[in-house]
Image (spheres, rainbow, N blue to C red):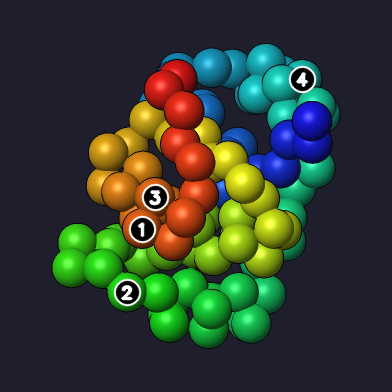
Amino acid sequence: MRLVARTIPHRELRNNQQQPQAAVASLLERFDLLETDRSLYREAGLLRGPHLRSLDALHVAAALRLDAEVMLSYDRRQIAAAEAVGLRTPAV
């Protein structure tokens, strides 16, 4: 299984999980990081959804770009957006 994350998880893990930087860096060494480029923003902007937030759209667009079949998230709205485009979202 390939683990991929956008480059933003550093901040999310430090803030949301209250992890020290060394622990975050150690964890993220297991992931391939996807750099965000202009075309990804464009792809995210084309996604539809009545409650789709900008960062959720970027995460879903990244998963679609990588031909992912599964997307992990704790966020209910992000899960709904992923499922709307056919991604599986197992409970975490």
* Mark 2–mark 1 CB contact (< 8 Å): yes
* Distance (Cα) linking label 4 and label 3: 30 Å
Query: Alpha-carbon neighbours of circle 3 within 10 Å: few (<14), some, or many (≥20)?
Result: some
The residue at the point 54 percent across, 78 percent down is 43
Specify the label residue 84 is tagged with: 1
Q: CA distance from mark 2 to mark 1?
A: 9 Å
Q: Nearer the viewer, mark 4 or mark 3?
A: 3
Which badge, 2 or 4, comes first in the chain's sequence? Answer: 4
Judged from the image, the secondary structure of the residue bearing numbered disc 3 is helix
* Amino acid at dot 3: Glu
Residue at disc 2, secondary structure: loop
Image quadrant in which the C terminus is located: top left
Residue carrying label 2:
48
For residue 4, what is the image quadrant?
top right
Quarter of the picture holding the N terminus: top right
Q: Is residue 56 visible?
A: no
> Residue 7's x, y, as percent?
65, 50
Kindly indicate whether the residue at mark 1 contacts the one at mark 3 (C-beta within 8 angstroms).
yes
Q: Which mark is residue 83?
A: 3
| Residue 8: percent from left, percent from top | 57, 48
Residue kind at label 1, given as amino acid type: Ala
